[in-house]
């Protein structure tokens, strides 16, 4: 007989009454005290096991809501049965994140709204009263797998353009929209996915305002890390001319890094297998053409070498080869 979501120490019988764990089940120490949810229930105790074998989703969710002591509101019922077994016990928050990973495959998510648990369709998540995090600050009790809304400020990038390009980096629970006023984005997704987008934007949101474009490519065959390195060497910072400024004191020209608007930045997001290109329109188009050359067949392009001829025209040399 298989029992699911039972407190540690409870008898493993299907018809056993729901009982709270005895006090001796966890030593009384600060390490086990943990945080508390709005109901006052200790949420950091590992007293929930996820062990299902062909159990209807409705029964599994109802059982979880009983263990969490939170009433369940079902906006969109889930069809089918759930099979998942893990002998390791979870905390309430860990169990909620694991369930949401499973439920996302069904197009729904379980969200905390006050003292309730609400089962909603993914497209309706952004309409719920989610926790708002400014700038991705997770200094509070926000979990990496928790669905939140984050306001991301931009310095130089166009919010509408970035919003369209970055949508492919989000999970199926995510949404992104430009702010109607100011330069920023409103992103709703799991915090870990939002942080990936923020890390990527921090790589390209540099330099003075200039006409630059952002393109994304979903890679199917080629190695993203190899192609990103190739593009950055060919069209990136190393290929752009340095800025020179005359110094009246030394009576010579000082050298500075190139303007970001003169070269392409390629960043690869391994989780979504997405390559992001950002830079001048013409160079981004050339970098895109180069990338597509590696997306032919099974992507086994072998070793790549870059040559910069000094005496022969590059086009003539390419035709000769």
Image: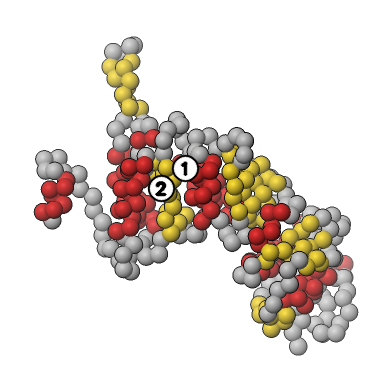
Question: Relative to residue 57, is residue 191 depicted above or below?
Answer: above
Question: Helix or strand or loop: what does disc 2 sit on?
Answer: strand
Residue 29 shows in the view: no
Q: Residue at x 80, y 65 (%)?
A: 73
Q: Which of 75 and 170 lies nearest the eye of the viewer?
A: 75
Asked if the residues shown at circle 1 and circle 2 are in contact, with their CB atoms under 8 angstroms apart, the answer is no
Q: Which mark is residue 277?
A: 2
Q: Is residue 314 left or right of residue 278?
A: left
Percent from the top left, x then y, of residue 80? 68, 80
Residue 200 shows in the view: yes
Q: Which mark is residue 203?
A: 1
Q: Is residue 59 left or right of residue 274?
A: right
Q: Quadrant of the N terminus?
A: bottom right
Residue 175, quarter of picture:
bottom right
- Closer to the chain start, of discs 1 and 2, is 1
Q: Residue at x 69, y 57 (%)?
A: 125
Percent from the top left, x then y, of residue 209? 46, 31
Q: Is residue 30 left or right of residue 221?
A: right
Q: Quadrant of the C terminus?
A: bottom left
Total marks shown come to 2
Percent from the top left, x then y, of residue 276? 43, 50
- Separation of residues labelled 1 and 2 (CA atoms): 11 Å
Question: Dot 1: within a 10 Å radius of its alpha carbon, few (fewer than 14), some, or many (20 or more) residues?
Answer: few
């Amino acid at each position: 007989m298989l029992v699911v979501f039972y407190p540690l120490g409870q008898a493993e019988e299907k018809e056993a009454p729901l009982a709270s764990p005895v006090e001796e089940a966890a030593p009384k120490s600060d390490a086990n005290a943990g945080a508390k949810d709005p109901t006052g229930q200790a949420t950091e105790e590992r007293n929930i096991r996820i062990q299902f074998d062909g159990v209807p989703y409705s029964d599994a969710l109802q059982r979880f809501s009983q263990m969490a002591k939170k009433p369940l509101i079902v906006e969109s019922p889930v069809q089918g049965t759930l099979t998942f077994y893990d002998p390791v016990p979870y905390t309430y928050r860990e169990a909620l994140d694991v369930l949401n990973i499973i439920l996302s495959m069904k197009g729904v998510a379980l969200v905390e709204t006050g003292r309730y648990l609400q089962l909603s369709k993914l497209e309706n998540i952004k309409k719920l009263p989610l926790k708002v995090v400014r700038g991705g600050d997770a200094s509070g009790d926000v979990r990496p797998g928790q669905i939140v809304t984050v306001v991301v400020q931009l310095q130089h990038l166009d919010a509408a353009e970035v919003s369209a390009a970055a949508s492919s980096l989000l999970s199926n629970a995510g949404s992104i929209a430009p702010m109607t006023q100011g330069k920023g984005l409103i992103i709703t997704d799991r915090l870990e996915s939002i942080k990936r987008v923020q890390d990527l934007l921090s790589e390209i949101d540099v330099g003075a305002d200039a006409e630059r474009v952002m393109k994304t490519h979903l890679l199917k065959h080629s190695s993203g890390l190899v192609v990103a390195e190739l593009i950055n060497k060919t069209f990136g910072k190393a290929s752009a001319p340095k800025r020179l400024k005359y110094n009246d004191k030394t009576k010579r020209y000082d050298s500075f890094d190139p303007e970001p608007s003169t070269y392409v930045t390629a960043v690869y997001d391994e989780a979504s297998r997405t390559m992001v290109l950002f830079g001048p329109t013409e160079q981004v188009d050339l970098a895109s053409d180069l990338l597509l050359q590696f997306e032919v067949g099974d992507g086994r392009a072998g070793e790549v070498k870059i040559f910069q001829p000094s005496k022969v025209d590059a086009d003539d040399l390419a035709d000769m080869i």
